[in-house]
Image (cartoon, rainbow, N blue to C red):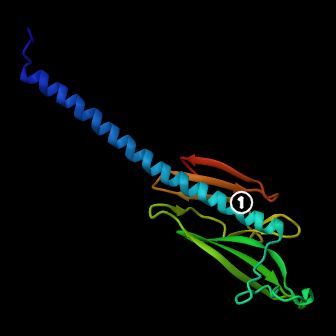
Amino acid sequence: MMKGYTLIEVLVVVFIILLLTGGSLAAFGNFSKSSTLKQAGLNLKNSLREVQSKAFTGEKDCNVSTSVCKCYDNDPTDDYSLVGWRVDFSGTNYTIKGTCEDLNDPPDFYTFALSTVNLPSDVTFSSPPPYFEFTYYPKVAKILPGSTNRSICLQQGVNNYYKLVVEESGNIIDSGVQLSCP
């Protein structure tokens, strides 16, 4: 024989179920936000590695119709030399570009943009350096002269950061999601 449940017992069970469901939804919301930030950080790290690879291998823009490096003919004496590849930062996106220089004294510099990457709508940069440049020769990572900030922090909300550090040697350190970022 089944025991009958009182109204209070039924309400307690329903309340417990609602409480567990609400907690699960809140945890999922936090997980979803954190995974958006983490994915943006991993995409940035991959972009930095791509730029680093292009600089170290000496890849430059040689497209006949758009080349700023003038390397599309068979005469290498008028080619512009590759300075390096860089990532320029703004509040909600970053641009991947290369730089060539001519042989004049003093030289003129020409940049060619490869792509611009937009961050997710709720993610921004938190005080990034203006750019990171990986030079073709010598093979080092440079930042704006006089700047010592080698950290790139993506920010989502108040205390949710994703931190990357680029060492002068070119090593990229991924510190992951953090509560603060200098």
- Residue 160, relative to residue 47: is it above or below? above
Q: Quadrant of the C terminus?
A: bottom right
| Residue type beneath disc 1 | Arg
Whether residue 149 is visible to the viewer of this picture, yes or no, is: no
Task: Please tell me how crowded label 1 is: few (under 14), some (14-19), or many (20+) other residues with Cα within 10 Å.
Answer: some
Residue placed most toward the observer, 64 or 146: 64
Residue 58 location (% of width, % of height): 83, 71
- Residue 175, relative to residue 3: is it above or below? below
Residue, x 7% and y 19% (percent of image)? 6
Residue 124 location (% of width, % of height): 52, 63
Q: Which quadrant of the figure has residue 48?
A: bottom right
Residue, x 81% and y 87% (percent of image)? 72
Q: Which quadrant of the figure has residue 150?
A: bottom right
Residue, x 51% and y 54% (percent of image)? 37
SS assignment at label 1: helix
In the displayed structure, does residue 120 sit left or right of residue 114? left
Whether residue 87 is visible to the viewer of this picture, yes or no, is: yes
Residue, x 75% and y 85% (percent of image)? 110
- The extreme front residue here reads 74
In the displayed structure, does residue 127 sit left or right of residue 105? left
Residue 140 location (% of width, % of height): 83, 64
Q: Which residue is mark 1?
A: 49
- Residue 76, relative to residue 45: is it above or below? below
Q: How many marks?
A: 1
Q: Quadrant of the N terminus?
A: top left
Residue 15 location (% of width, % of height): 19, 31
